[in-house]
Amino acid sequence: MIVMFGATGTGLAAFKTWQNEGKRPRYSLDQWDKVMMERDRRLTGTLRGQTDNPQAPLGFEFSNGWKLEKRFN
């Protein structure tokens, strides 16, 4: 029974690492982290991907990640 708990824990940890592209999982994400992850997804195609290219890809200059709130009149 102890071996099965160990195997299950190891399997879940390996799956979580694979799911996060080999990086450690993120915990306690705040709004800033979520916005930056969305920006990374739009730039690279993955939530955990990052790029060092100083030029934004074509079509990115008009793609704004910030959501505007409706103003009261």
Image: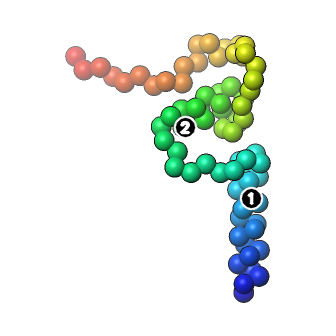
> Marks 2 and 1, how far apart in space?
22 Å
Whether the residues at callouts 2 and 1 have beta carbons within 8 Å, the answer is no
- Report which residue position mark 2 lands on: 33
For the N terminus, the quadrant is: bottom right
> 30 above or below 57?
below
The amino acid on which the numbered mark 1 sits, given as a three-letter code, is Phe
Q: Residue at x 69, y 50 (%)?
A: 24
Residue sitting farthest toward the left = 73
Q: For the residue labelled by badge 1, is the local secondary structure a helix, a strand or a loop? A: helix
Q: Nearer the viewer, mark 2 or mark 1?
A: 2
Quarter where residue 45 is shown = top right
Total marks placed: 2
Query: How far across and how far down the image is residue 73, in percent?
Result: 22, 16
- Report which residue position mark 1 lands on: 15
Near mark 1 (Cα within 10 A), the count class, few <14, some 14-19 or many ≥20, is few
Query: How far across and how far down the image is residue 32, in percent?
Result: 50, 34
Quarter where residue 13 is shown = bottom right
Residue 36, which numbered label? none
Near mark 2 (Cα within 10 A), the count class, few <14, some 14-19 or many ≥20, is few
Query: How far across and how far down the image is residue 26, in percent?
Result: 61, 48
22, 59: nearer the viewer = 22
The amino acid on which the numbered mark 2 sits, given as a three-letter code, is Asp
Q: Residue at x 70, y 56 (%)?
A: 16
36 lies left or right of 11: left
Q: For the residue labelled by badge 2, is the local secondary structure a helix, a strand or a loop? A: helix
Q: Residue at x 62, y 12 (%)?
A: 61
53 lies left or right of 35: right
Q: Residue at x 71, y 64 (%)?
A: 12
Query: How far across and how far down the image is residue 71, in percent?
Result: 29, 20
> 65 above or below 46?
above
